[in-house]
Image (cartoon, helix red, strand yellow):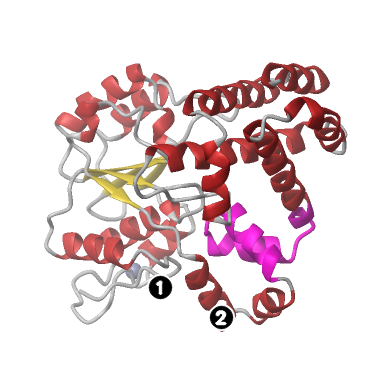
Amino acid sequence: MKNNFSGIIANDELCSYFANAIESSTLSHAYILLGAKGTGKHTLARLVAAALSCESRDNETTPLPCLECNNCNKIMNCISPDVMYISREEDKATLGVDAIRFIKEDVAFFPNDSSFKVYIIEDAHTMTAQAQNAFLLTLEEPPEYAIFILLCEHTESILETIKSRAPILRMKMPKRDEAMGFLKSNYPSARTFISNSPEEFEQIYMASGGSIGRILELIGSSEKKQILQNRELAQKLIESIAHNRLSSDFAEICTMFSQKRDEREKIVAQFSEIQRAARDLITIKKSDEPNLIFFTDFQYAEELSYGISVKKLMEISESTERARLALLRNANVKLTVTNYLSELI
Ligand SMILES: [Zn+2]
């Protein structure tokens, strides 16, 4: 079946898979959509929900979703009562049992507009074990109309019992050239930017996780400068550790942090960028087919990874996450940064 999963690039196979499963009514009750931030997990989940509930579903010549009918419009604008977004509270690191309790109660009610109810569980990799066990009860005997789409950045924390009921589908990030080609042929402003600043484009491409929407947003915004600075500092820190010269680079790194003037949001974003850099080196060391989300040059990243153990990388990653969460919980910014850097040295 032809599908109309527009806005998703580099994932044709996945789109066809869903289109065929919808056409043949062989959709599973649950899926894990696995992919880095910005690879289009939300968009795809929404498009699947729209294709399921599209009013043109019985019209064999219309590729689904039509994106024009009332159901499609409501779903794509996130106002459909039949598509629920389950997310963790802003200041929480995990998705707890309360969210699952809500699903359990809500799923008992029939859909409003169509024959399906779709639950999109955001950051499902942060679900606590208790929440997952509670969810399992719903997953074991779901009502006919219920579909659960779990959006995950990794699946290490997902229980085997959940995985066995929810096939894992991997989102691919458009390759740099794919993204570049798409942007050049569809957006004149992006075309100009790419030819004038090819190196900056590479940085933005990585920072956006391959998300076309995010790349476009960044190209014309003042946020771009901040992101380039965050990437520079994250790379500098990881390089210093890998080359065993953090002590001599310490003053420079402190100065780079101080340029953020202790602004909480900026430092939180900085910590996320450091996590992405550390994650890349862990992936290089552990995976046969590493998919990088920070480094633009694979060979360079691989060389860096030789100078630093997985254990050390995990420690960096954990310290960074602790510091990031502390800031989200309103800890003193200056003190958190000072403690964080002294932990690394
Ligand atoms: Zn429609």
* Tag 1: amino acid: Glu
- Is residue 164 covered in magenta? no
Question: Residue 126: where, in percent of width, then height?
Answer: 43, 28
Q: Which label sits on residue 68?
A: 1
Left or right of residue 246: residue 206: left
Question: Residue 218: where, in percent of width, then height?
Answer: 69, 60
In this view of the protein, which residue sits in the foreground, 16 or 251? Answer: 251
**Residue appearing at x 71%, y 80% in the figure:** 192
Q: Which of the two labelled residues, at mark 1 and mark 2, occupies the earlier sequence position?
A: 1
Left or right of residue 302: residue 81: left
Q: Quadrant of residue 264 in the image?
A: top right
Q: Quadrant of residue 114 in the image?
A: bottom left
Q: Quadrant of residue 15 in the image?
A: bottom left
Q: Assign the C terminus to one quadrant of the image.
A: top right
**Rendered position, 290 above or below 329:** below
In this view of the protein, which residue sits in the foreground, 274 or 95? Answer: 274
Magenta residues, start to end: 198-225
**Residue appearing at x 56%, y 80% in the figure:** 186
Q: Tag 2, which secondary structure?
A: helix
Question: Residue 311: where, in percent of width, then height?
Answer: 49, 23
